[in-house]
């Protein structure tokens, strides 16, 4: 009988410096520590791209483009390689690949907790593919709002004092649309993200753009990327564009696929506590 090798946490820690290597997927097949480090620190679509968080995260934060789970690695590479002004054009150029991956990811969202959202996002994509991008965007934004609010709240948060917890709860109530922006802004310019924060920042990176403040007042400038507030308060033909519809669909799929992983984790914990 062959004994299973014991994987030490330090072995995993030692492999973190290799998670952005181009050949990481091939090496992870025979290196359990590297495979574990990869799963803990990088979204699936980043793996093997050769890109680093410093290169990818600005695509999400500056351009409002989802980067967790979607788009595919080769599209991420193209987005990083181009200028910020050209990123939306890159997405449209690779639209078929992006939508194919969206369909595949939604097929993986099978938990009952995400059933309604999966159905509605699938229908939004169907509307987009049929040429009704305005309808697709309106539906995706409606579904995307609660998804983005869910993603904005950390699943786990540690407080150093009761006062800190109370202040956080007050902030959560008063700034629910701004929680993701506050969390991203808490990282100082030039400061390195902690290893275990990369996945979360990849997920919430586009949310501040999605929740850009807008009230529909006369003369107020409409946000230049997909906006929940512009869609709700002052929908226009210009804003409900194919480009913004694609951004909204990607955001929904990104968060929904992450929610599926969360649901699976909760199910495992429940099963563990219930026992055989």
Image (cartoon, rainbow, N blue to C red):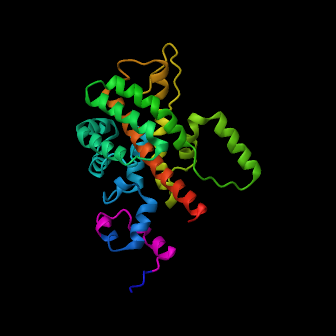
Q: Residue at x 27, y 43 (%)?
A: 100
Q: In this view, does 267 lie above or below 97?
A: below
Quadrant of residue 34 within the rendered picture: bottom left
- Residue at 41% over, 47% down: 110
Give the number of callouts. Answer: 0
Q: Is residue 187 visible?
A: yes
Bounds of the magenta segment? 6-26
Between residues 276 and 223, which one lies in front from this camera angle? Answer: 276
Against 22, residue 220 (above or below) is above
Residue 226, x across and y down, in percent: 41, 30
Task: Please give left or right for residue 91 compared with residue 62 in the image.
Answer: left
Q: Is residue 225 visible?
A: no
For residue 8: magenta? yes
Image quarter of the C terminus: bottom right
Q: Name above or below for residue 73 compared with residue 2.
A: above
Q: Which residue is drawn at 38% across and 64% down?
A: 19
Quadrant for residue 28, please give it: bottom left
Which is the main secondary structure of the residues drawn in magenta? helix
Quick check: 271 left or right of 257?
right
Q: Where is residue 155 in the image (x, y as percent from the top left)?
A: 57, 50
Image coordinates of residue 188 in percent, x first then y, are 55, 50
Placement of the N terminus among the 4 image quadrants: bottom left
Residue drawn where x is 40% and y is 25% of the image: 138
237 relative position to 187: left or right: left
């Amino acid at each position: 009988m062959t004994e299973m090798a014991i994987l030490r946490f330090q072995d995993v820690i030692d492999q973190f410096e290799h998670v952005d290597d181009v050949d990481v997927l091939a090496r992870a097949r025979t290196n359990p520590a590297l495979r574990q480090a990869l799963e803990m620190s990088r979204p699936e679509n980043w793996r093997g791209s050769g890109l680093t968080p410093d290169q990818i995260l600005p695509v999400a934060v500056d351009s409002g483009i989802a980067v967790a789970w979607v788009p595919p690695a080769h599209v991420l590479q193209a987005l990083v390689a181009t200028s910020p002004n050209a990123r939306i054009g890159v997405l449209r150029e690779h639209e078929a690949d992006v939508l194919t991956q969206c369909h595949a990811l939604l097929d993986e969202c099978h938990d009952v907790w995400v059933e309604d959202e999966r159905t509605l996002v699938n229908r939004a994509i169907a509307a987009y593919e049929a040429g009704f991008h305005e309808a697709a965007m309106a539906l995706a934004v409606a579904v995307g709002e609660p998804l983005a609010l869910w993603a904005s709240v950390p699943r786990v948060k540690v407080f150093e004092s009761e006062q800190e917890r109370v202040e956080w709860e007050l902030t959560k109530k008063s700034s629910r649309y701004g929680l993701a922006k506050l969390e991203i802004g808490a990282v100082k310019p030039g400061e390195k993200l902690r290893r275990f924060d990369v996945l979360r920042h990849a997920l919430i990176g586009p949310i501040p753009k999605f929740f850009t403040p807008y009230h529909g007042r006369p003369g107020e400038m409409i946000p230049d990327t997909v906006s929940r507030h512009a869609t709700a308060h002052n929908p226009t033909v210009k804003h409900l564009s194919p480009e913004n519809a694609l951004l909204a669909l990607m955001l929904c799929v990104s968060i929904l696929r992450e929610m599926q992983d969360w649901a699976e984790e909760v199910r495992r914990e429940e099963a563990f506590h219930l026992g055989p």
